[in-house]
Image (spheres, coloured by chain):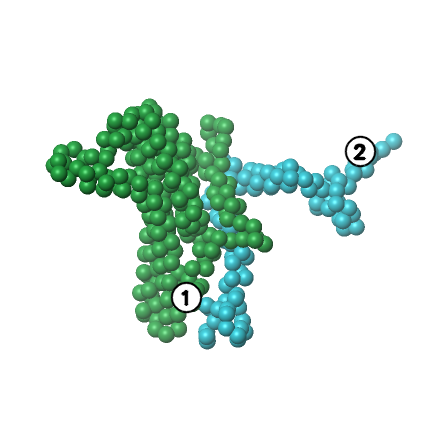
Amino acid sequence: MASVGECPAPVPVKDKKLLEVKLGELPSWILMRDFSPSGIFGAFQRGYYRYYNKYINVKKGSISGITMVLACYVLFSYSFSYKHLNTYHLAFLTSEHERLRKYH
Amino acid sequence: MNENLFAPFIAPTILGLPAAVLIILSPPLLIPTSKYLINNRLITTQQWLIKLTSKQMMTMHNTKGRTWSLMLVSLIIFIATTNLLGLLPHSFTPTTQLSMNLAMAIPLWAGAVIMGFRSKIKNALAHFLPQGTPTPLIPMLVIIETISLLIQPMALAVRLTANITAGHLLMHLIGSATLAMSTINLPSTLIIFTILILLTILEIAVALIQAYVFTLLVSLYLHDNT
């Protein structure tokens, strides 16, 4: 007879959340995720609603709900233009950010 | 330095694919919709702003012109959010690309004009000749009016592109001038920094105004033709 705190049947790996997956099971967990287009779209939708319901859809939402999104957008755009900020067409290039270097 | 000036205006690509599409699709994420009457603060502010602008814009049209209200309101929201997002550092502004502005201006203008020509031909043709012109001037004036009509979509697109591009370029230049002067001469750095702050305020205003002007002109063309 099972006591109160025991789980009657083991949960399959596929349905566990990421933080409950043990480290050894991680590759199989990744392989079992749904990578079809509708699966990826569902993942984006879940992520969007998770952020939205936590920070924006509350009774007294503050401006930080949006500024976090904008900060992420800035970092994302920076990572896009990182490569271009670092190229400099002369032969000597010692450090990054050609415009911020002191001696040209 | 000269070739780096126009670098922010190159359309971004991921492995050769245009990422500009993703960037153009990103402003709607900041404007949620809701099915409730009373919403969170973000949606309430946005709905209030939208109501304000749509009332202001659509009062001068008749019933037929008001069928365009969804198009015009979404146009002004799109241009305003895209321009404002472009003021953030390192971001890409799609409205700096002439191709996109032409794609917005030409169909809207053409739709208004063709609608005018189909429904009320006499009124539409009457635009080509202002009232009370002396008779010898008529042929030349018709030519001039035709040219001014045909140049409207070009003017719409180029106006938006040029304003936003020029503003971004100025901010780049003055920003790098501030950085360069900071090691040489401190008081002039403060002066240039003040100029930069004023310019940023101007840019915010320009972002909003350009959206407004674009939409207003389209609605004007619509009013002429309904």
Q: Is residue A97 above or below residue B93?
A: below
- Give the camera-side residue of A47 and B117: B117
- Give the camera-side residue of B137 and B80: B137
Q: Which residue is mark 1?
A: B2
The tint of chain A in the picture is cyan
Q: Secondary structure at mark 2?
A: loop
Chain identity of mark 1: B
Q: Position of residue A95 (x, y in %)?
A: 54, 71
Question: Farthest residue toward the right?
Answer: A1
Q: Is residue B55 visible?
A: no
Q: Is residue B172 visible?
A: yes
Q: Which residue is located at x 41 percent, y 66 percent? A: B2
Q: Secondary structure at mark 1?
A: loop
Chain identity of mark 2: A
- Give the camera-side residue of B79 and A47: B79
Instruction: Please give the count of numbered marks on the rendered protein.
Output: 2
Instruction: Classify residue B71 as left or right of residue A31.
Output: left
- Give the camera-side residue of B184 and B1: B1
Kind of residue at badge 1: Asn
Instruction: Classify residue B97 as left or right of residue A35.
Output: left
- Distance between mark 1 and mark 2 Cα atoms: 73 Å
Residue B52 found in image quarter: top left
Q: Which residue is mark 2?
A: A4
Q: Which residue is located at x 75 percent, y 40 percent? A: A14
Question: Which chain is represented by green in the image?
Answer: B
Q: Have a look at marks 1 and 2 and say if they share a chain.
A: no
Q: Nearer the viewer, mark 1 or mark 2?
A: 1
Q: Which residue is located at x 43 percent, y 64 percent? A: B3
